[in-house]
Image (tube, rainbow, N blue to C red):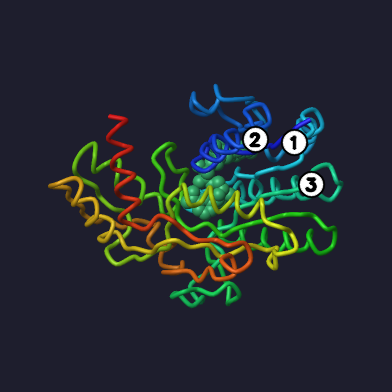
Amino acid sequence: MAKSILILGACGQIGTELTLELRKRHGSEAVIATDIRHGDAQLKESGPFELLDATDYAAIEDVVMHHEVEEVYLMAAMLSATAEKFPMRAWNLNMGSLFNVLNLGKERKIDKIFWPSSIAVFGPNTPKKETPQNTLMEPSTVYGISKQAGERWCEYYFKKFGVDVRSVRYPGLISWKTLPGGGTTDYAVEIYREAIAHGQYTCFLKKGTQLPMMYMDDAIRATLQLMDADPERLTIRSSYNLAAMSFAPEEIAETIQQKVPGFKMDYKPDFRQEIADSWPNSIDDSKAREDWGWKPVYDLEKTTEEMVSQLNKLR
Ligand SMILES: NC(=O)c1ccc[n+]([C@@H]2O[C@H](COP(=O)([O-])OP(=O)(O)OC[C@H]3O[C@@H](n4cnc5c(N)ncnc54)[C@H](O)[C@@H]3O)[C@@H](O)[C@H]2O)c1
């Protein structure tokens, strides 16, 4: 029997595209998409879908046993901006779901786990430029604290119990298929949608706020490349730094103006500015490059080209 793969939180920004790509590679029936809500039609029609709460250990265990699941991708989480509004709910979801999959690994009910961390593990005291893999980490957001604790637990379960858990620190992700889920880098998706729909965008971060970003195709490729890597080559079991490009709002606006003439942007920073100010400007991902051959394909120009052309097709 072909191996089964379980995605928790499959209806989100990353989970949707990850599920579709995994189904392409392993066959539709082998990839079980689950979430606490229903996702888009393409996701539901392309293979098995179940409603499943990632904080419910017994329910996940049932699905794992029933479908003979070998690999789990845990994409359920509360993201940075929303987590500031609901700290305890964010902590309980982000940590509870991680412990559930780590414990399934410890009990040898699953063989391999992917769990994403984030650039939010870094804080205001971290060096901002080309932030190294190992550096001062004092996250100042609820979300960042949960990701940093998660990284420590991943490494602990690997070292103590031999759990094969793999992770990357995603930067802000840009995609056109599914709307982002309440993060601080969401502006870099909204800007394209608003430019095409209304020719105008009010940015919630101020000019000059440079943040690390990545186009979704690169993020999915990185995820699958890491999951396919020879375990002997992986020297990091907390989470790998991962990078593609870094830009500020005015730079992304410039590339859009070239494709959407007359596009205008103004600025109205809100509470997300403080979160963005605590994060790095750029990331050193040399360990990912060395250990499992990571190399991004999309820069800002290529991302804008793809976003504008795909969103125009949806009109
Ligand atoms: N998108 C980014 O830019 C980004 C950047 C860094 C890290 N990440 C991480 O990647 C992962 C996926 O992020 P995303 O952007 O796809 O998030 P998202 O908010 O778009 O999707 C999360 C999904 O989880 C589901 N969910 C929430 N509670 C659940 C529960 N109890 N049980 C099952 N499902 C539940 C939601 O319904 C949603 O579909 C998260 O761990 C996030 O922290 C994302």
Q: Which quadrant of the render holds ligand 1?
A: top right
Q: Residues within 10 Å of mark 1 (few under 14, many from 20)?
A: few
Q: Nearer the viewer, residue 13 or 1?
A: 1
Instruction: Identify the disc placed on residue 26.
Output: 2
Is 101 on the left-hand or right-hand side of 75?
right
| Label 2 close to label 1 by CB (< 8 Å) | yes
Which corner quadrant holds the C terminus? Answer: top left
Indicate the position of residue 293 as horizontal and vertical percent values.
58, 62
Q: Is residue 83 above or below residue 19?
A: below
The residue singled out by tag 1 in the image is 3
Element class at badge 2? helix
- Which is nearer the N-term, disc 2 or disc 1? 1
- The amino acid beneath tag 2 is His
- The amino acid beneath tag 3 is Asp
Instruction: Look at the image and tell me whether residue 79 can be seen.
Output: no
| Res 241 quadrant in image | bottom right
